[in-house]
Amino acid sequence: DGGITQSPKYLFRKEGQNVTLSCEQNLNHDAMYWYRQDPGQGLRLIYYSQIVNDFQKGDIAEGYSVSREKKESFPLTVTSAQKNPTAFYLCASSVPGASYGYTFGSGTRLTVV
Amino acid sequence: GQNIDQPTEMTATEGAIVQINCTYQTSGFNGLFWYQQHAGEAPTFLSYNVLDGLEEKGRFSSFLSRSKGYSYLLLKELQMKDSASYLCAVTPGSNYQLIWGAGTKLIIKP
């Protein structure tokens, strides 16, 4: 079955450390997205990529980095520069054609300890 | 700017009907989505509207008025499992990126 896999589901990080969240899809979708969700808030776009080897900053890109070396993979690195990284991170993908919407991974909950 | 407004929280009774409203002001319009999100889980697709009118899918219906920048999600015969957040999202441009509302937390009481 096709889908998006995010790993790990829970992640703990010490302050000052970088951490990478994995996102893999086998849906053959061109576009991929990373969102951050804080309690009681909506989805905020961190980065997105519409094609391999190309990505764009979203609304809250500071302190984050991404790569898109393969169509299937869009890892997100939370760097030590991100001042408040504790949040729920969601990866999504889509194809051109508005009626399809986005398909989401199950999310990674990152906690800084 | 782009803006999507939804009520923060609503409460309803099991077996009843509830309507969740969404108003939007965006630079363009290529469709409006409703997603359901249970706590700690990923959003799941509920509906898509691009033309004015009502789309019905079982217990859930979604309505759109483009001239008013308005949509609602109607949930009938509420069940306890319908307790979740409901997210309204608009795709304003041809690249089909979504602009998200903050979501409406729906609490169902017995």
Image (tube, rainbow, N blue to C red):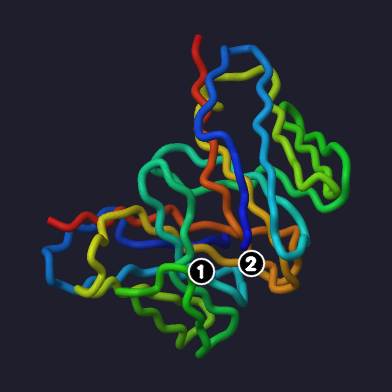
What residue appears at the point 26 percent right and 61 percent down from the top-left corner?
Answer: A85
Dot 1 and dot 2 residues touching (CB under 8 Å): yes
User: Residue A74, how many percent across, how many down?
Assistant: 44, 76
- Please tell me whether residue B28 is drawn above or below residue B8 in the rendered image: below
The type of residue carrying mark 1 is Tyr
Q: Chain of mark 1?
A: A
Quadrant occupied by the N terminus of chain B:
bottom right
- Please tell me whether residue A92 is drawn above or below residue A69 in the rendered image: above
Query: How many marks overall?
Result: 2
- The image quadrant of residue A32 is bottom right
Q: Nearer the viewer, residue A99 or B97?
A: B97
- Please tell me whether residue B82 is drawn above or below residue B39 in the rendered image: above
Q: In terms of secondary structure, where does tag 1 sit?
A: strand
User: Residue B72, how many percent across, how many down?
Assistant: 72, 36
User: Residue B59, how many percent across, how many down?
Assistant: 72, 26
Query: Is A37 displayed left or right of B107 in the figure?
Result: left
Which label is found at residue B110?
none
Query: Is B68 displayed left or right of B101 in the figure?
Result: right
The type of residue carrying mark 2 is Gln
Check if mark 1 and mark 2 are on a common chain.
Answer: no
Q: Chain of mark 2?
A: B
User: What residue is disc 1 on?
Assistant: A33
Query: Can you name the residue that lies furthest to the bottom here?
Result: A53
Query: Can you name the residue that lies furthest to the top here?
Result: B110
User: What residue is disc 2 on?
Assistant: B97
